[in-house]
Image (cartoon, rainbow, N blue to C red):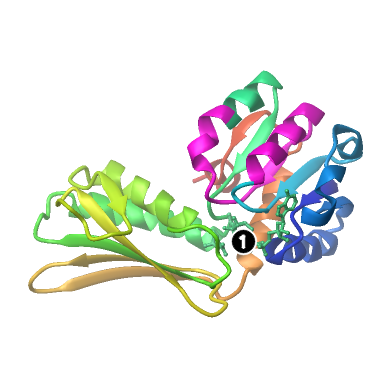
Amino acid sequence: MKIALIGYGRMGQAIEAIAKERGHEIVLTIDVDNQHDLTEENLKSADVAIEFTIPASAPANYKTCFSAGVPVVSGTTGWLDQKAEIVADMKKHDGTFFYASNFSLGVNLFFALNKKLAELMKNRPEYDISMEEVHHTKKLDAPSGTAITLAEDLFEAHPAKKSWTLDTPKSDEEMHIEAIREGDVPGIHRIKYESDIDYIEIEHSAKSRHGFALGAVLAAEFSVGKKGLVTMNDLLNL
Ligand SMILES: NC(=O)C1=CN([C@@H]2O[C@H](COP(=O)(O)OP(=O)(O)OC[C@H]3O[C@@H](n4cnc5c(N)ncnc54)[C@H](O)[C@@H]3O)[C@@H](O)[C@H]2O)C=CC1
Ligand SMILES: O=C(O)C1=N[C@H](C(=O)O)C[C@H](O)C1
């Protein structure tokens, strides 16, 4: 598979190493210094683009790939307020878009566990619910994309909670998410249920970025030949 790598930071470099180990070829590498080389012409040689950049750059990068007819796999977080526009653009070009707030298998199993626990707790108003996420100090967005996915899944299964806030909740319908930035932490997510008599917590802690990067390469392999929106549930058969 010929890959265009858009974003050559921590994730781009981890993805390059795994893609090469799996026998793929990187035919184009774009980072902030050569971003103008991301053109339809230069994308012609790629079977798929893998995009891990920054919230401000990702939407324009997706549109260039859709115009070029190249499937896009992206894990960039913090741009979802523009999702409707991006999906419309993908459809206009009959494109392929595989987006995941977290590409690790373990986190996707954790998503299922979160839904199950929220379902069990939906008639237990004695438990207050909160979340905590911990990431490295270079992270630009808060809360993490993964925390937002966890929160949205929780609200669906547990309708007493309806929205999240990074501040002190103003009502019982709001759930607090604490976003902690320290060191080079690859990513920790905790969901906490607390009553007057006990405390239940589930946690996922990434030991490195390997799981995210491997998931992104597997997603790229899966995306070639597909059309429309593709998700981790499709890849993992969840
Ligand atoms: N979905 C997932 O599984 C994961 C998602 N992420 C997300 O991926 C994104 C990237 O994370 P990292 O690699 O850790 O960040 P990073 O800061 O190490 O790398 C981002 C790179 O994008 C480059 N960049 C900025 N504007 C660009 C443009 N217009 N074109 C091309 N490159 C550009 C920067 O120069 C930088 O090298 C973040 O949004 C992060 O939240 C990170 C890990 C896992
Ligand atoms: O920025 C990161 O590093 C990460 N970002 C993703 C997110 O926002 O959820 C995934 C992972 O937690 C690492």
What is the residue that sits farthest to the bottom in this orientation? 183
Quadrant of the rendered image containing residue 196: bottom left
Residue at left offset 60%, top offset 45% = 235
16 and 235: which one is in front? 16
Residue at left offset 68%, top offset 28% = 227
Q: In this picture, which residue range is highlighted in magenta?
A: 57-85
Q: Is residue 31 visible?
A: no
Indicate if the residue with disc 1 has its beta carbon within 8 Å of ligand 1: yes
Residue at left offset 27%, top offset 66% = 192
The image shows residue 163 at horizontal and vertical percentages of 28, 46
Q: Is residue 92 above or below residue 56?
A: above
Q: Is residue 107 visible?
A: yes
The image shows residue 42 at horizontal and vertical percentages of 90, 39
What is the residue that sits farthest to the top in this orientation? 92
Residue 220 colored in magenta in the image: no
Quadrant of the rendered image containing residue 199: bottom left
Image-based side of 40 in relation to 77, left or right: right
Q: Which residue is mark 1?
A: 212
Three-letter amino acid code at disc 1? Phe
Residue 76 colored in magenta in the image: yes
